[in-house]
Image: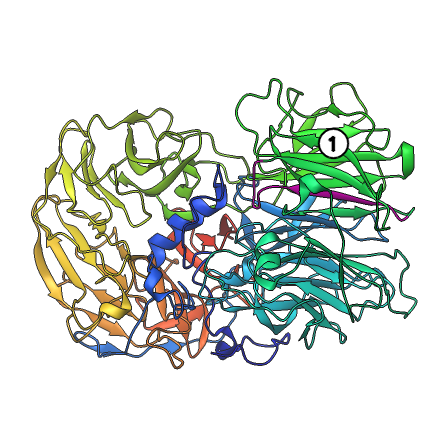
Amino acid sequence: MEDGPPLINVDWKPKESHDRQLKGEGMWFSHSNIDPFPWKEDRMKRQYNAKCGVVPALLAVLVAGVVGGCGGGASSPGTGVSTAATVQAAGVAATSWNSVKWGGGGYVNGLVYHPTNASLLYARTDVGGVYRWNAADSTWTPITDGLGFGGGEGRYHDVESLALDPSNDQKVYIATGDTVTGGANGRLYISSDRGNNWTWVSLPFPVGGNDNGRAVGERLKLDPTNPSTMFYGSRTAGLWKSTDSGQTWAQVTSLSSTTISGSSSPIGVEHLMFDNSGVGTGQTTWIMYAAIAPDYASAAGLTSVLYKSVNGGASWTPVPVPTQAAGFHIPHMVRTNDGMFYVVFNKNAGQGASGPGYLYKFGGTVGNGSWTLLSSSNQGGYGGVSVYGTGSNARIALGVSGTWGNYGGMQVVQLSDNGGQSWREIEAGMPGETASGWVDDIEIDPANRDHVMHVHGGGIVETWNASAATPTWANKVNNLEETATLALTTPPAGATYKFINSSGDIGTWVDSDLATRPTKGPMNWWSSGNSADMAWSDPQYIAAVGVDNANNHVGVGHWSGDGGNTWTKFATLPTGAAAGTDGAANVAVTSRNNVIWAPNDAVPSYTTNNGASWSATNLPALTVIGGAPRSYRLKVDRKNPNKVYAYDSGGAWWNQWSDTAHFWYSADGGHTFTERTSFKATSPMVTFFGNTSMAVNPNVEGDVWLADGNALYHSVDAGATWTKLTTFASIWGSNNWPDVQGATAVTLGKAAAGSPYSAAVYVVGVVNGKWGVYRSDDAGATWTRFNDDAHQFGGIYHLAGDWNTYGRVYAAGNGRGVLYTN
């Protein structure tokens, strides 16, 4: 599969979204030996499991994604009547898209200042794209929400490296993708206006923005005196070079022509450093250093983890490193204006990696005495390093990773004001919002030596008084929203809250104020929310299911009787719930104390006594298909809560010939079910749980909508018969799964005044070959695009319509938190 031509700033071209995404919500393959505190991996694992499934046998072929096609199969006719609809001209799109306040919530894997404009700062993230700092109002501006980051392109929100042109502060380059999708190659995005608009080219090697060791580098480096020449340290195929500003690339075979497998999260060539700080003279920088990870050095037969070239990369020689650091990673190194290099060595790779770690100063000459040890640690690993000034007066900030828990006595940020002769801790135990763990990139503000910031698993923290005896720290995450939502649900009009967000790694939250970080949740610690629901006639009663990550990673359930102010854990769990920790778990509430819970890969159960006991329903057990988690998608008929609907999407596209999708119906509050419709050999087609969505109209009994991943269906008789709305259709290429899914999310919200249908219908899908969010006010007779090209968010995976305000939806972008429309 080829990426196609570069995306220019015109209407989105669906074929250019080829094979995008099996991770970021996409394909996940666990690397359990990597991270002691897997903030983002754990979240994205569940996010993929909810969307696609874990199928190691398909690693080499599954390179499409959730909205981009991690499910699908051959097209098949609809059940009942198929109706075409008119697509109206644009003009009713949402007037604005804003972020619901959370702040951070994900791993920022790199901070990059412009080398000659200290007021220009960028943050790259592992699944949520790139942000540019706006000093005027102290907020982050997301710059990867538009063209090039739409349906089917979510994997390109995984950013592995970012580079800035030192002679032109308008130019930005980012390398994106993830190697876990079967080795699919990455993209290089190019902007000439600080990220407001982008073009892109396909790279000839894999890129791992959400892979192990994603904070090293930067891997992408521009020659400071000749910025049209750039190099990239790849994970699997050595060092690469471009002489035309990234348009074409060639492997630097003088270092190595070896290519290694992408299936075990290789690190490869970690980064490059030029021995030159000049800007834009047009001359080649001849001397440079390449840091080589031990895995690639071993595979390529290289004899050191550091190599030097004195002829612009035409040839390379090994640089002997200190004996105790031989075979270590070099996550970061810094060159100061006096020509000295500050080089971090660490035994282990990856975010939050443990030590031992060493910081050395290196003068560039090879021989005895060329390395000076400045710091070492066995307590935590060394990650980021930043230097302000030179020589004996240099201020050095050193990030210590892999330290957790109570701050007393720990190292998090070590600071030296005398070139590394002595050190003091400036974060552990200090006042404010401090953050240990993944301190894998740290920066001293080039314009203010007292301003120090670093990344971590939940965002960015900073201090503005690093010279103080007790520096004060605060979050730097205003409008940086990187949480990964797994489910959204909204209550009836007039409820005391606006929506419930079930999210990976940060848990379940009841949100009543869009501009303030929520406080109402059952587990205010490292946890994940998989699903939540409320009693429609009594929305103060809420049931939420998820995972207690901090305590043995077990499935848990809670209930609240007061709109989320207080919570109680269910006294017992249904069969399969403790082990059912994947995002496919689903819960539905018929009335206070009455809950149906469908753990993934288990028979759903119900309780009539608020979880004191559970009884199994008669729904058939679901067989795991090729590692893809499954569950029943449950919905309660809000007009008549005795009616409960259950949809089984069939499991996975490759199972389409041996299983089928089923729609079940209960008339006794979800205790017993009868199969209402079998879609065998018709439609909806078999696909992953997370590619599907179901919504019920609270104003009309038996009025159900279903998105099966490829098309949209409507039933007005509780699922006995269905009308297929042929407006929505997947974009197909040469695979057995779609390049871009035709209809993945459907929700209902408050109807427009005077509309012929009692609810506004919103669908994420493809109409006339164009992906987006579409709205209908007349039960699907006509549709208008509700988003626009500037608001695509790497794909939109979950929608929940508001019942108070017409035209408002809550949407979950790819690693972009929750957004809402006005």
Q: Position of residue 376 (x, y in %)?
A: 70, 31
The colouring scheme, among rainbow, by chain, secondary structure or one colour, is: rainbow
Task: Give the residues drawn in magenta, as a range.
Answer: 339-354
Q: Position of residue 74 (x, y in %)?
A: 28, 78
Q: Residue at x 60, y 52 (%)?
A: 294
Q: Is residue 744 above or below residue 211?
A: below
Element type at marker 1?
A: strand
- Left or right side of 496 for 471: right
Answer yes or no: is residue 750 visible: no
Instruction: Assess whether residue 347 is covered by the magenta stretch.
Output: yes
Answer yes or no: is residue 598 visible: yes
Residue tagged 1: 375
Q: Amino acid at mark 1?
A: Ser
Tell which of 404 and 479 is nearer to you.
404
Instruction: Assess whether residue 61 is covered by the magenta stretch.
Output: no
- Left or right side of 375 for 698: left
